Amino acid sequence: MNHTALSRRRSPRGTLSLLLATLVALALVWTVAPAATAGGTSTPPVPPTPTGLPAGIERLSPYVPGVACDMRNRAGTVKLAQLIKATYANTYGLVRSCTSATKPSEHYDGRAVDTFFNVRDTTQRTNANALIAWLLATDKAGNPYANARRLGVMYIIWNNKMWSSYRSSEGWRPYSSCATMPTTAYDTTCHRNHIHISLSWEGALGRTSFWSKQVAPADWGPCRPAALNWASIYLAANPRRCSTYPTVAAPAGASALLKEMVPSSGMLLKPGMTGPAVKTIQKALGVSATGTFASTTQTRLKAWQSAHHLPATGVMWQATWVAMLDANGMRR
């Protein structure tokens, strides 16, 4: 059959129908096809994996909770945040002030990154999912979760769900009750406008093979003593798992001041710090409760320490906390 002859005989209405059909088909292709990236590919970028990695690899990190009020940016945490930023041009947050906290967090240890992607933005959601897939992918040597292990990733929270290295066999599981709270009012709580990544101590300190090219030994970090709710700041590597203890509570009939002191007990407080925990200590010392650890507070604290046969450092260390709790009626 002569298709040219048929074309000549096609009516104007038929030609218009063919044109419309062609435009619809093209529109579907444009809609379905993924958007090209700046590099001309159809896949989102991922961070570069370094060369020269050792054949060995870190274990999946056990759960090592936040324990201290330290607020130092850790080398590995910063490098991970900057690696993600260099790949996706997004922003990030690291340490947080802990003097108003009632319980520890990896953010207060310098072991957590909030890297900002918004699930309601298609490009940001695609990039976030690509980053997570890169972290949890199996490498060419057959190591599952390879980049997460080499970076010391302990857990990830994103878009209503949580993945944990110490519960990796469960995969992604629901985070809190976020699936029942879809409105934008809960986007921060449910990690829909950022990815939270918590790291092991070796990951946070930049000792893992992703950065050092050597498999890092386990580091359990500082341990919380039984008598206090916060541990001391990180001073040296700890190769042994810490003992765990119940949360310390004020005894029945405790004074209002003791009840106020106990949740912050053990928290390192020093000149220059501000917040409710500082105000509590000022009340215990009998100085103006400004919430700012200035010279008057330091001088009074040194005098208090000397009177109780402690080194007059002017810093709230663990021994000072124990003595001050006891002086205000703590029973053990």
Image (cartoon, rainbow, N blue to C red):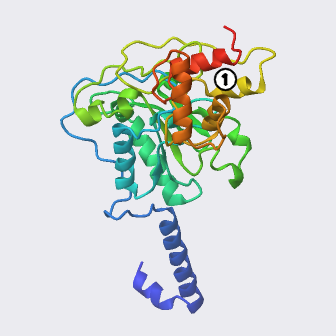
Q: Does the image show residue 248?
A: no
Q: Quadrant of residue 233?
A: top left
Q: Residue furthest left?
A: 52
Percent across and percent down for residue 328 are 69, 19
Q: Is residue 88 above or below residue 273?
A: below
Q: Residues within 10 Å of mark 1 (few under 14, many from 20)?
A: many
Q: Quadrant of residue 157?
A: top right
Q: Is residue 269 left or right of residue 276?
A: left
Depth check: give the residue in front, 241 or 139.
241
Percent across and percent down for residue 294 are 53, 42
Q: Is residue 249 above or below residue 303?
A: above
Q: Residue furthest right?
A: 253
Secondary structure state at the residue bearing disc 1: helix
Query: What is the total number of numbered labels drawn onto the structure image?
Result: 1
Depth check: give the residue in front, 201 or 197.
201
Percent across and percent down for residue 128 are 47, 49
Q: Residue furthest top?
A: 332
Depth check: give the residue in front, 275 or 320.
320
The residue at 60%/36% (across/down) is: 278
Percent across and percent down for residue 215 are 27, 25
Q: Quadrant of residue 261?
A: top right
Identity of the amino acid at label 1?
Val
- Could you tell me which quadrant the N terminus lies in? bottom left
The residue at 66%/33% (across/down) is: 280
Depth check: give the residue in front, 29 or 251.
251
Q: Does the image show residue 295?
A: yes
Q: Is residue 288 above or below residue 303?
A: below
- Could you tell me which quadrant the C terminus lies in? top right
Q: Is residue 95 left or right of residue 207?
A: right
Q: Is residue 215 left or right of residue 299?
A: left
For label 1, the residue is 262
